[in-house]
């Protein structure tokens, strides 16, 4: 399977880097929502929420559609696939034992300071 384009991954990870956008994605896991309903729990303007939604849409994580006068937001699970595939590539390595790693660093540091 080909690896996702780096610029696509940049958009996805940049979108996920913001806690407001992650919360919006969590909200959309439950159901489609009107933009005004998405904005309701946040202490920010509708324009600010719209910018967050634009970032999520540009990254392909949500879709927006007009139904009459209302814009609805819907989670797009396929949008997360590129990031998921990229991260799964790191699953081929054994997990690092952090205790062993810490002991190694302490030993190295001690040896370095004794020189």
Image: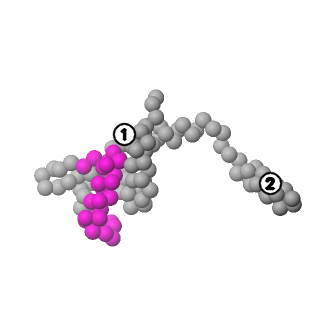
In the image, residue 24 lies at what x, y percent?
36, 57
Q: Based on the displayed image, in which of its 4 quarters is residue 36 positioned?
A: bottom left
Residue that carries the numbered disc 1 in the rendered image: 78
Q: Secondary structure at mark 1?
A: helix
Say few, some or many: other residues with alpha carbon within 10 Å of mark 1 (under 14 / 14 to 19 / 20 or more): few
Q: Is residue 79 above or below residue 28?
A: above
Q: Is residue 80 above or below residue 3?
A: below
Lower position in the chain sequence, tag 2 or tag 1 = 1
* The furthest residue to the left: 68
Seen from the viewer's position, the closer of residues 5 and 59 is 5
Q: Residue at x 57, y 40 (%)?
A: 90
Task: Point out the stretch of residues depicted in magenta.
Answer: 38-64
Q: Residue at x 84, y 56 (%)?
A: 111
Say few, some or many: other residues with alpha carbon within 10 Å of mark 2 (under 14 / 14 to 19 / 20 or more): few
- Circle number at residue 67: none
Q: Secondary structure at mark 2?
A: helix
Q: Residue at x 86, y 59 (%)?
A: 115
User: Is residue 87 inside the magenta stretch?
Assistant: no
- Circle number at residue 108: 2
């Amino acid at each position: 399977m080909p690896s996702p384009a780096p610029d696509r991954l940049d958009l996805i990870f940049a979108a996920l880097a913001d806690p407001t956008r992650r919360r919006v994605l969590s909200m959309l896991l439950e159901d489609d929502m009107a933009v005004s309903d998405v904005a309701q729990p946040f202490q920010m303007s509708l324009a600010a929420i719209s910018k967050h939604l634009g970032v999520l849409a540009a990254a392909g994580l949500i879709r927006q559609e007009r139904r009459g006068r209302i814009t609805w937001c819907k989670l797009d699970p396929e949008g997360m696939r590129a990031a998921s595939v990229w991260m799964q590539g790191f699953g081929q390595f054994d997990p690092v034992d952090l205790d062993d790693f810490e002991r190694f660093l302490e030993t190295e540091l001690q040896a370095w300071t004794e020189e």
